[in-house]
Image (tube, rainbow, N blue to C red):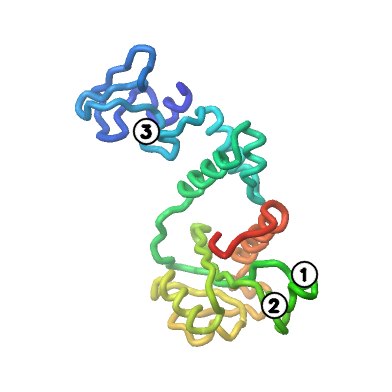
Amino acid sequence: MEWIERCRWGDTVSCPRCGSGEITETTNRKPQPYWCQPCRQYFSVRTGTFMEKSSIPLQKWLIGIYLFLSQPKGYASTVMAKELGVRQATAWLMKKRMQAVCLTVLNQFSGTVEIDETYMGGQRKNRSKHQRMLLFGLGRGSSGQFPVIGALHRETNQIIAKAVDHTDQETMHAFIHEQTTQEAVIDTDEARCYRGMNRNHSVVCHSRREFVDGTIHTNGIESFWARVKRSYKGTHHWWSRQH
């Protein structure tokens, strides 16, 4: 607790609600360690964070944060529950709070932006004949899977990914216009759905085994898809469309 307080406030404790330094330390640190005179409320180092109003011990929160951030292929709540000695539902709630903190409000991307799409879901070869006909019909390749489109801002490495219904030109152009500024430079592969967009558009031709043309490439967003699919196949094994 003292270490976290030093990380957050340094040598002088201040109220997380109003920023006041008129603080009184409570006896035995109960009901909470500090009392703010202007706010006339108790507070602790958890106040104003995603750990506020949680009965989970702070040490388990810190270990959970470490486990969550140190697993590049994702971390299942069932495994976290075993490591921390809590219920799976508790570990799931902890993960959801951590994920919410990682989400930042992103403005429209400017500069160079990589755009690409992928398909998520089980493969045909892993299904029974009945499941293939039921879920995939007579389609091939990505039939039965759901498409996801993503944009990577090359200067900041920030990424936006979104599940969509189709990868037609209308859907792709709407996503690009929503997530990028008029001055952005868009790098994509040669898929037809990217043609005719109202942006400065550069193309790398994968069909000719061209993966980098000077500064034009989509390697960053493709690396992100590889990491996502490792998480899907190696850790979680199945996701609903919602997630």
The quadrant holding residue 222 is bottom right
Amino acid type, label 3: Thr
Q: Say whether disc 1 or disc 3 marks the residue closer to the N-terminus.
A: 3
Which structural element holds mark 3? loop
Dot 1, how many residues are within 10 Å of its Cα: few (below 14), some (14-19), or many (20+)? few
191 in relation to 55, above or below: below
Near-viewer residue (83 or 108)? 83
Near-viewer residue (34 or 91)? 91
User: Is mark 2 in CB contact (under 8 Å) with mark 3?
Assistant: no
Near-viewer residue (199 or 133)? 133
User: Is mark 1 in CB contact (under 8 Å) with mark 2?
Assistant: yes
Which structural element holds mark 1? loop
Q: Residue at x 31, y 28 (%)?
A: 14
On the image, the x and y values in percent for residue 33 come to 36, 20
Q: Say whether disc 1 or disc 2 marks the residue closer to the N-terminus.
A: 1
Which structural element holds mark 2? helix
Q: CA distance from mark 1 to mark 3?
A: 49 Å
Q: How many marks?
A: 3
Q: According to the image, label 2 marks what residue?
A: 136
Q: CA distance from mark 1 to mark 2?
A: 10 Å
Q: Say whether disc 2 or disc 3 marks the residue closer to the N-terminus.
A: 3
On the image, the x and y values in percent for residue 23 come to 27, 21
Q: Residue at x 33, y 27 (%)?
A: 43
Relative to residue 229, is residue 101 drawn left or right? left
Q: According to the image, label 1 marks what residue?
A: 127
Amino acid type, label 1: Arg
